[in-house]
Amino acid sequence: MAQRNRGRVSDPAQAALSGSHRKASGSAGGYLLFFCDSPNTKDRKNPTELAVFDTAGHARSVWNDFAFGFLPGPSGTLIVGHGGEANLLDHELRTQETLKCPMENAACSIFIPPSRPSNSDFALCSYTSIEESCRFYQGLPSKLVLDRKLDTPPSNGIPTDPYKRESFQAAASVAPDNRSAWKVSSSGRWYFDNRGRLTSQDSNGQMAPVSAEKWTPDYSNCTGDRSASEPFRFLATCVGAHIYTDGALDGLFGYSRIALFDVASRQILARIDGPAYTSAILSPSGKLIAVEHEERIRLYRVD
């Protein structure tokens, strides 16, 4: 339940999706995008269903096909791949442009840079068991800015992300070298340390907790999402567990905690506590939070 004393949090809509579903990171044209894969191979007519929800929770369009990708593209488009090509769709799911994958008769994947600015908006990569080739594009219509083969072949059939993670120096006790970091200012970045604490690091390598409040769950696994527009907001989503024991009975209870931060002040603007197996994503403006749990999506507005 949202803690409303931390800011005005409204719950304008709730949408139900059938099948097992995953969320597409980002948005196109101010709309939240979710797609579902149905596990029922006997009754389903199409393997994938894509729905576009406006901020009131209404589905604007539905598109069915064998597809992969579902990533935000340039100029508010959505990049969806199928077969040996990728389509850039508008918020009505109309095709604006079609691009071929780099290699024929090979698997294909779509990647976007983890942060902006970047010299390209997305990469379209083809891969086999021994090689991976990527084309980097920018703008709409898409301009090819780089075409190259990667030095690292796919590992266990999984393609390599051509966009390198942002690297930074840190103390050995924190060891964040292999952790994802989010650039929140020209000289600062945030990351979750090895204890699940949201931590900041400045250009001099100085590290400090973002918040003195103990809000992350015990034994937590956390991820983050930064707004695209300023003033920047940061959404932290953590799932953890609480261990209960009275000497005779032991119990393990999963739960989640979601916190929205104002980056400049480091204040928590809103917090949502819920069950385990919960995921969340932040809209580009930083004013809408989409929370998914057990095939249902709930939207929260934080002004």
Image: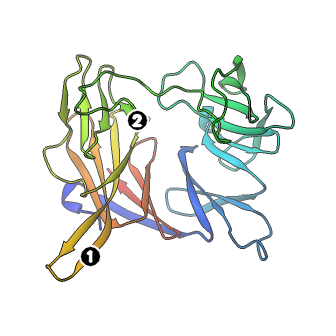
- What's the amino acid at mark 2? Ser
**Mark before the other along the chain sequence, 2 or 1:** 2
Give how far across and how far down residue 17 sits, in percent.
59, 69
Indicate which disc residue 180 carries: 2
The residue wearing badge 1 is 251
Between residue 3 and residue 119, name the one nearer to us: 119
Percent across and percent down for residue 284 are: 46, 41
Q: Is residue 290 visible to us here?
A: no
Left or right of 218 in this view: 16? right
Q: Secondary structure at mark 2?
A: loop
The residue that appears at 57% across and 64% down in the rendered structure is 58
Q: Residues within 10 Å of mark 1 (few under 14, many from 20)?
A: few
Q: Residue at x 33, y 48 (%)?
A: 236
The residue lying toward the viewer, choosing from 289 and 12, is 289
The relative height of residue 170 versus residue 294 in the rendered view (above or below) is above
Visible residue check, residue 5:
yes
Examine the rendered structure and indicate whether residue 135 appears above or below residue 10.
Answer: above
Which amino acid type is shown beneath numbered disc 1? Gly
- Give me the residue at 25% from left, 34% from top: 174
The residue lying at 73 percent from left, 28 percent from top is: 131
